[in-house]
């Protein structure tokens, strides 16, 4: 009975490199560089369009697929393109707002806050090269223009005044301005914890002037229309 020989499995080595793009490069010693994985980030405003583009994809490109999320899974496929037949097949996760280009990039139109998250591009190139790119999209909300409310239409000297910055947006930063310059809080001029209310107590003649509030997030900011506060005499 002849001796059996056991074929040793090919050696597979993954080496992680600390780079800005969080690059993870995996090598298969039996061939060449088979798999490259990396991560990219994009941001855009709600309602806009954004091009998810990964550089240097067109050269030697045989086919590619876009997935919703980080899993390379048929159930999460947005689209698959095959160069040899110049064919594009849409998947289960297509929303109808995508435009797929032959260089592997994908345009998303009229994006919403729900579009925030990961998308994955899987490409196949000549010589068995495969690349997986995880693309994170952050969609930011454009803040609504705020407006000011005053608790009294007629203010008298030494009375109390409360101005409210009215905005439907939550999780925003609020800043106040007096005569178009940043307002400084004092013992008389105080702000509520969320800075939506400005209290002046008592009101002095020096407080007469123009007030504005500004609402902002990390992507946008808007100021209210100016409100003129005056004192009534008599």
Image: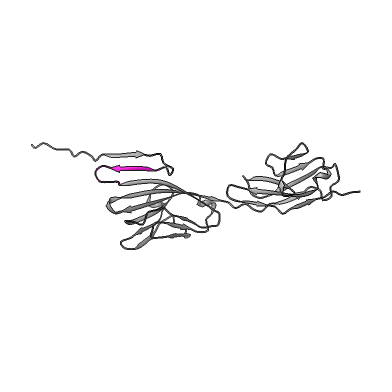
Residue 159 horizontal/vertical position (percent) = 84, 42
* Residue 207 as seen in the image, left or right of residue 87: right
Q: Nearer the viewer, residue 175 or 120?
A: 175
Residue 143 horizontal/vertical position (percent) = 62, 51
Quadrant in which the N terminus appears: top left
**Residue under the image location 74 percent in, 53 percent down:** 226
Q: Which residues are magenta?
A: 23-33
Above or below, 85 relative to 222:
below
* Residue 19 as seen in the image, left or right of residue 173: left
Figure disc tally: 0
* Residue 42 as seen in the image, left or right of residue 177: left
Residue 17 horizontal/vertical position (percent) = 38, 39
Of all residues shown, which one is farthest toward the left? 1
Residue 233 horizontal/vertical position (percent) = 89, 49
- The quadrant where residue 184 appears: top right
Of all residues shown, which one is farthest toward the bottom? 86
């Amino acid at each position: 009975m002849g001796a059996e020989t056991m074929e040793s499995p090919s050696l597979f080595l993954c080496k992680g490199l600390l780079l800005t793009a969080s690059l993870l490069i995996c090598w298969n010693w039996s061939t060449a560089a088979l798999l490259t994985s990396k991560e990219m980030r994009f941001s855009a405003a709600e309602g806009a369009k954004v091009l998810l583009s990964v550089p240097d994809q067109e050269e030697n490109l045989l086919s590619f697929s876009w997935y919703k999320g980080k899993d390379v899974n048929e159930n999460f496929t947005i689209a698959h393109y095959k160069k040899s037949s110049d064919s594009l097949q849409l998947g289960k996760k297509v929303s109808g707002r995508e435009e797929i280009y032959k260089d592997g990039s994908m345009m998303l139109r009229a994006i919403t806050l729900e579009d925030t998250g990961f998308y994955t591009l899987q490409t196949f190139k000549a010589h068995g090269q495969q690349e997986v790119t995880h693309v994170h999209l952050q969609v930011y909300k454009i803040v609504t223009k705020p407006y000011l409310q005053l608790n009294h239409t007629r203010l008298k000297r030494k009375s109390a005044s409360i101005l409210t910055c009215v905005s439907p947006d939550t999780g925003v930063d609020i800043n106040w301005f007096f005569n178009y310059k940043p307002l400084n809080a004092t013992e008389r001029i105080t702000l509520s914890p969320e800075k939506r209310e400005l209290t002046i107590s008592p009101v002095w003649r020096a407080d007469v002037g123009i007030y504005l509030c500004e609402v902002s997030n990390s992507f946008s900011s808007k100021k209210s229309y100016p409100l003129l506060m005056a004192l009534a005499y008599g």
